[in-house]
Amino acid sequence: MRQRPLLWHRAALATLLCLCAFPAPARSQSAAATPAPATVEGFNCSANSTYPCQAYALYRAGFAGVPLDLSAVGDLFGVSRFMLAHANNLSTSAAPANGQPLLVPLQCGCPSGSPNAYAPTQYQISSGDTYWIVSVTKLQNLTQYQAVERVNPTLVPTMLNVGDMVTFPIFCQCPAAADNATALVTYVMQQGDTYASIAADFAVDAQSLVSLNGPEGGTKVLSEILVPLRRQVPQWLPPIVTHNDVSIPPPSPPPSATPGPSDDRNGVVTGLAIGLGVVGGLWLLQLLLLACLWRRLKAEDRQGEAVVSGDGGEAGRSAKSASGGGGGGGGERFLVSDISEWLDKYRVFKVEELERATGGFDDAHLIQGSVFKANIGGEVFAVKKMKWDACEELKILQKVNHSNLVKLEGFCINSATGDCFLVYEYVENGSLDTCLLDRARARRLDWRTRLHIALDLAHGLQYIHEHTWPRVVHKDIKSSNVLLDARMRAKIANFGLAKTGHNAVTTHIVGTQGYIAPEYLVDGLVTTKMDVFAYGVVLLELVSGREAAGDGGELLLADAEERVFRGREERLEARAAAWMDPVLAEQSCPPGSVATVMSVARACLQRDPSKRPSMVDVAYTLSRAEEYFADYSGESVSVSGSGEIAAR
């Protein structure tokens, strides 16, 4: 029997005592769900579960060349460093130890038409990558190459190119009522694991593993099983569980494949089982500390101390004068305490180097609005010039880290003038709206490219809606805030209006005509569904090649409702083909794919926000739209003189 440290026993006892203090969750009156062990395609969708849901995967740090860094692990799974840190009770600057187990938060879904539940993870192919190698090494058998082939029907596994974006389905499952679990963890069996040892590490009973996965004899090393999390967890604190600190044994490769990484199990138990009573005490202590900190900051603010420049005296007075003189910050000032948490995360630029790099912010360097192109040390950046109102945007940007969001590289504060500069990665091909409206550039945007742009935007929104805590609402999704890189892949930009939280109400309505959701315009209701509505408008722009609102104020949505959305469903394909961008009509374009995108747009543009889909469902449906290319014969669609649609 393994010897567990005394800390383990104390933590387990605290957990037991705290759980006893809560009323027992209501049990389902139905029989327990039939065990559904994972196959090479994953866990089967269950009629007894509600999708989508919060799920987790157990990942061990330090393998397959993935750096020992929360940001690197977050990038691999498309989750933020912030969420990863909170799911594992770590600070955002913590570096995991080699082999340290980490809980990776996932949004698990069972999209319409899929027999299996999974969390889609976007991965960019590098030299030497295959479906099998990535699944076994970097993703540590949390998926299987057969499942990857199924969810990427338009890609040929033996003809992958460097830079290809592939969806890797991380196996997951949503709990049924009979499972009596807050969430389920996807766990890959290691050499020496037993149900008893895993159950002990997660502070659950071994019978629960049998109920979820079937008899222990049916499992083998490197097979995926589900482990329940059963604690009542406050919404402000993601669950913390115990793990067995083990590493990955060498897998059994298919013919002609290279084996994955190996290591010996050391049997060290890290013991993170902390009772809810302990967590409650820490929470209370944290509140007291925050109250003391708030009083201290208010006192500093009243005394006019701690201005960012740090040189005090005249600089401090200049900053106070600038912020109070009607600048963009509405009288707000940055304090050292406001930005100290970002100083070790981002590069801090000097005002002088930004001025040199932009020719003194000359119009020749202007990209759009107040964004300038800057060349610093041979590297190109985009510099956004603002007044003292960047604090909220910085707070949000430090939470997010995703390939479909424009990356913040650093910032600069000029206390003398009241300016703040946010320095972003430079995205080569500019904004989507300029590409669509320039007919020459629009011809580069064939239908497959536009579909990929729609998917990229969906993945970026899914990330900020589901994998940040609190959830982030962008509030300003529009084609001018969608930037295209050298490969014409999309990145979401401009988080200046973004807000954290959900179901907030505001009386200060801001936005762009043609994109504003009706519930926000009428009631000031801020939810993720307002981003979904604006996303639906961007889909209309991608299909039509037109602006959301014309010069005369006519709305693209109104035209789509009149000419495409009305009428019999079976004629949608023909109506969409007649309405789409003439540039697309000149090219080979699967009509069924266009109709699918228009169907998604119509769902996103529902007046009732509760009827709009989540971005998880949108991303899955759009990925299926690409399947039309696999069987497409090259026939295009034309409009006859009578307005009828004919294939040719």
Image: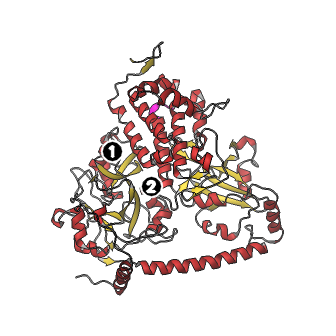
Considering the whole magenta stretch, tell me its main secondary structure. helix
Q: Earlier in the sequence, mark 2 or mark 1?
A: 2
Q: Residue furthest left?
A: 217
Where does residue 378 sit, x and y in percent of width and height?
63, 50
Which region shows up in magenta? Answer: 445-449
Asked if the stretch drawn in magenta spans residue 209, the answer is no
Residue at image mark 1? 151
Residue at image mark 2? 78
Q: Quadrant of the C terminus?
A: top left
Camera sees residue 517: no
Give above or below for 541 relative to 33.
above
Q: Amino acid at mark 1?
A: Val
Where does residue 115 sit, x and y in percent of width and height?
28, 47
Q: Residue at x 38, y 46 (%)?
A: 166
Asked if the stretch drawn in magenta spans residue 447, the answer is yes
Tag 1, which secondary structure? helix
Q: Residue at x 71, y 53 (%)?
A: 386
CA distance separating discs 2 and 1: 17 Å
